[in-house]
Image (cartoon, rainbow, N blue to C red):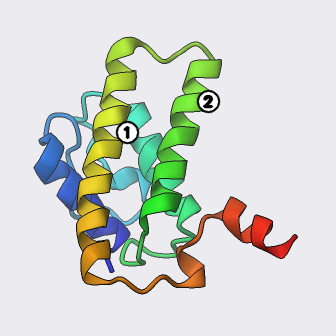
Amino acid sequence: MTSFYNLLVSLEEKLGRVLLPVDHKAVEPARLISSSAAFLELTRSVASEIYLENACKTKNDPVTLYPTLDAIGRIKKDHRSLEVLDLVAADFLEQIGAAVIQVLTHEACHNSKLTPSSRSRSQRGFART
């Protein structure tokens, strides 16, 4: 499985160091995004939300596709409702989502087993009802 840290490194490779520079020495999820990022606060909030949605405890914990996409979608929705999401930032979030799909779908092809922990918080809650 892809770890949170390895996902960020893959995103850095796909999107470029200007948009998503990873600070390889950092430990905290938001601080893994270097302060030189083009959309610093937006990118750090995406990293933090992905970390939380996947219930990570360390940067080496695994992340999965749907919780990660849920996190990105939530950031986009929240920023849009606050009217702080411009067209360029919205496009950037779409690019992150597309890159996440590439990275994590490629992994899913190699690891076709689905586990209960790979479901998002909302799916886990729905399954109980």
Q: Can you see residue 125? A: yes
Q: Is residue 50 left or right of residue 102?
A: right
Quarter of the figure that contains the N terminus = bottom left
In this view, 106 is above or below 29: below
Q: Is residue 110 left or right of residue 91?
A: left
Q: CA distance from mark 1 to mark 2?
A: 14 Å
Residue drawn at point x = 59 percent, y = 30 percent? 77
In this view, 124 is above or below 112: above
Disc 2: CA contacts within 10 A as few (<14), some (14-19) or many (>=20): few
Determine which residue is flagged by label 2. 78
Q: Is residue 51 left or right of residue 110?
A: right
Residue drawn at point x = 57 percent, y = 61 percent? 52
* Amino acid type, mark 1: Thr
Q: Nearer the viewer, residue 9 or 115?
A: 115
- Under circle 1, the secondary element is helix
Label 1 with label 2: CB-CB less than 8 Å: no
| Circle nearer the N terminus (1, 2) | 1
Quarter of the figure that contains the C terminus = bottom right
Give the x, y percent position of residue 28.
43, 61
Residue drawn at point x = 21 percent, y = 35 percent? 19
Give the x, y percent position of residue 5.
30, 67
Q: Nearer the viewer, residue 53 or 60?
A: 53
* Amino acid type, mark 2: Asp
Find residue 95 and report its image quarter: top left
Disc 1: CA contacts within 10 A as few (<14), some (14-19) or many (>=20): many
Give the x, y percent position of residue 113.
42, 86
Q: Is residue 120 left or right of residue 88?
A: right
Determine which residue is flagged by label 1. 43
Residue drawn at point x = 42 percent, y = 62 percent? 65
Q: Can you see residue 23? A: no
Give the number of the mark in front: 1 or 2. Answer: 2
